[in-house]
Amino acid sequence: MEGLPILTLITFLPLAGALLVAVLPSRYARPVALGASLAAWVASLLLVIGFSAGRGGLFQFVEKVSWIPSFGIEYKLGVDGLSLVLVVLTTTLTWISILASFKPIQTRIKEYMVAFLILEVGMIGVFLALDAFLFYIFWEIVLVPMYLIIGIWGGSNRIYATIKFVLYTLIGSLLMLVAILATAFAFQDAHGGDWTGAFDFQALREFATTGGGFDPTLQLLAFGAFFLAFAIKVPMFPFHTWLPDAHVEAPTAGSVILAAVLLKLGAYGFIRWTLSLYPYAAQTFAPAIIVLSLIAIIYGAIVALVQPDLKKLVAYSSVSHMGFVTLGIFVFQPQGMAGAILQMVNHGLITGALFLLVGVIYERTHDRTIAKMGGLAARTPVYAAIFGFFVFASVGLPGLSGFVGEFLTLVGTFAVSPVAAAVATLVMILAAAYLLWMFQRVAFGELSGFLAGLGHHLTDISPVEILTLAPLGALVVVFGLFPGILLDTISGSVEVAVRDGASGTAIAIDPIAVAIGLGLVAAVVVVRIVTIPFGRQPAAPAAPAAEGA
């Protein structure tokens, strides 16, 4: 299997499906798109079977073809434990999202399916690329189809949301391109003008960690550029403001992929690229990133607590949960790093399911206002039971996968800063508060007049909708009871990432610059907290046909 181009097959099977959808009549768009995504999923499972966890953090199934030899740019793909679990997460959520789109998307079906399959190509490519230029190409590919998915099939305020999403992401990614070029020029200059390996991740990593490393000033500037691109994508506070708008306006499947996979691109970038290439800068900025992570955990929980819109509540919960991911990464502890990666996978499964469940009830009511949903359990008991299961998983109930990632993150954080661990632990109480309070208001009590007025239109969850949720529920249970399945797979990647991050020491920075930076962060924090929208009414809900518009 090592000799087969399995990684290329996984990456470009969705593209082949997109081309097939484009040339076939519209009536074949749904089954062909689902078939292509399922084929990529099966190929990723074959990759799992052939993957050897005992080879540490070494890349496996490496495929390399010279692309632009004059600059040392290659088409190079490879997989380790970290990228493996994220690729499988991507292929799993993609076919589930396409299946969940069958009923809601009723117009321009071919275009929607083509966009979704190309989106999958970009996401998989980001996780597999071992050439910095190729990584950037895949990173940018993701932007276009998501722009179209939100902008064409989104809600009533979709144009504002999608332009905001693109502007935020594009600014960060363009700066990242500058950092990639600067790093490549520095590498070739250190090697006598030879461009060989100037964009190769493995060559850059070896030089950065054992071959002398890059200039401290370059590290600080390049890390800052990478940080902005990845922090926007995660999204970290205070770069998160595009996320609630994009989630609320996106169609259900778009929200699922946005939360379950796209947010992980930033966290993956932190682990793969910044820790390995700029370890001194990573150590320098780690205290500030830990502070921002704690702010994100607190802020996301507080704002979620007061949200009247069901979808926006889940969106803000993502800000809080992803704060645990960046916290675990930058404490440079094995337990924290393992917890961060597990949290990435678990957040993808659980929050993806929650967005699917929000979509289920929206299809029946065309409303997401929590106050109007009281008493759902009386009319839709199966839906309420499934919703409750994933709510408890998101809270971090022991025995379900959400618990393990947060626990390991807190253990790793405690070894570095007991105060930071204590703050993060206390905020978990807020997570339980906003999720359980939301579930109590939605599921129990007297049937609301709004729901009673829907009559026979308020039906329980359908078999197809259960089919989209069943794999996620099964994985939540399996990874909750047997977390060793994931921990063994990622152990080599965790060891390498922690070693790379710890290989540097903090760079001395002008105290005045530090004071100015902290002052700016404090000002942003104060402004954001003061303007928390307590009691603000949500925008008017989208028209019933919004997802297919």
Image (cartoon, grey):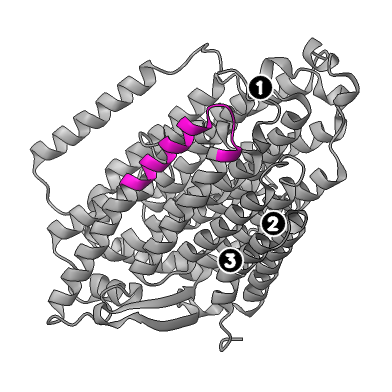
Residue 267 included in the magenta stretch of the image: no
Q: Position of residue 121 (x, y in %)?
A: 54, 63
User: Label 3, on which residue?
Assistant: 15
Q: Which residue is mark 1?
A: 437
- Residues packed near mark 3 inside 10 Å, few (<14), some (14 to 19) or many (20 plus): many
The N terminus, quarter of image:
bottom right
Q: Quadrant of the C terminus?
A: top right
Q: Residue furthest bottom?
A: 3
Q: Is residue 440 visible?
A: yes
Q: Nearer the viewer, mark 2 or mark 3?
A: 3
Cα–Cα gap, marks 2 and 3: 14 Å
Mark 3 vs mark 1, CA separation in Å: 43 Å
Q: Earlier in the sequence, mark 1 or mark 2?
A: 2
Q: Nearer the viewer, residue 436 or 247?
A: 247
Which secondary structure lies at badge 1? helix
Q: Secondary structure at mark 2?
A: helix
Q: Residue at x 35, y 62 (%)?
A: 273
The stretch in magenta equals 152-171
Looking at the picture, which amino acid does disc 1 mark? Trp
Q: Which residue is mark 2?
A: 95
Q: Is residue 54 rendered to the left or right of residue 166?
A: right
**Can residue 506 be seen at all in this image of the molecule?**
no
